[in-house]
Image (tube, rainbow, N blue to C red):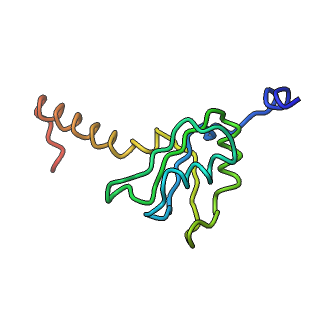
Amino acid sequence: MAMQRKTNVRLPPEVNRILYVRNLPYKITAEEMYDIFGKYGAIRQIRVGNTPETRGTAFVVYEDIFDAKNACDHLSGFNVCNRYLVVLYYQSNKAFKKVDTEKKQEEIDKVKKKYGVNTDT
């Protein structure tokens, strides 16, 4: 019955197996992460940020997309050590958009230099 239900469900396009979690306590351990997120399904991987820029964030990868959706629905706003979690679906096109625009601008500048185009008037 459960498999029958899952085959007929259409999920929004942003839903995927990878969750991006923000506002985590800095001292949270991997075991605590598995305790919190493991209640919603089988987890393939958890990556907790360990640099100054990524502290307080994590990626949680589920085996099944429906488990990830369930976890996102239930854990967004969940209180952990007086911090409310922000749970989002990971979207690679948005995550690397800034890097891509910088690369594109470099390519444009190279082409302008190659052909002697000067737009600074």
89 in relation to 84, above or below:
above
Residue 3 image position (x, y, % from top left): 81, 27
Residue furthest bottom in the image: 82
Residue 63 image position (x, y, % from top left): 62, 33
Q: Quadrant of residue 78?
A: bottom right
In the rendered structure, the answer to whether residue 91 lies left or right of residue 41 reads left
Residue 66 image position (x, y, % from top left): 71, 37
Q: Residue at x 44, y 50 (%)?
A: 48
Q: Residue at x 10, y 33 (%)?
A: 116
Residue 47 image position (x, y, % from top left): 45, 45
In the rendered structure, the answer to whether residue 45 lies left or right of residue 95 reads right
Viewport quadrant of the N terminus: top right
Along the line of sight, the residue nearer the viewer: 28 or 96: 28
Along the line of sight, the residue nearer the viewer: 26 or 9: 26
In the rendered structure, the answer to whether residue 120 lies left or right of residue 4 reads left
Along the line of sight, the residue nearer the viewer: 89 or 61: 61
Q: Quadrant of residue 60?
A: top right
Along the line of sight, the residue nearer the viewer: 98 or 9: 9
Q: Residue at x 15, y 36 (%)?
A: 117
Residue furthest front in the image: 31
87 in relation to 10, above or below:
below
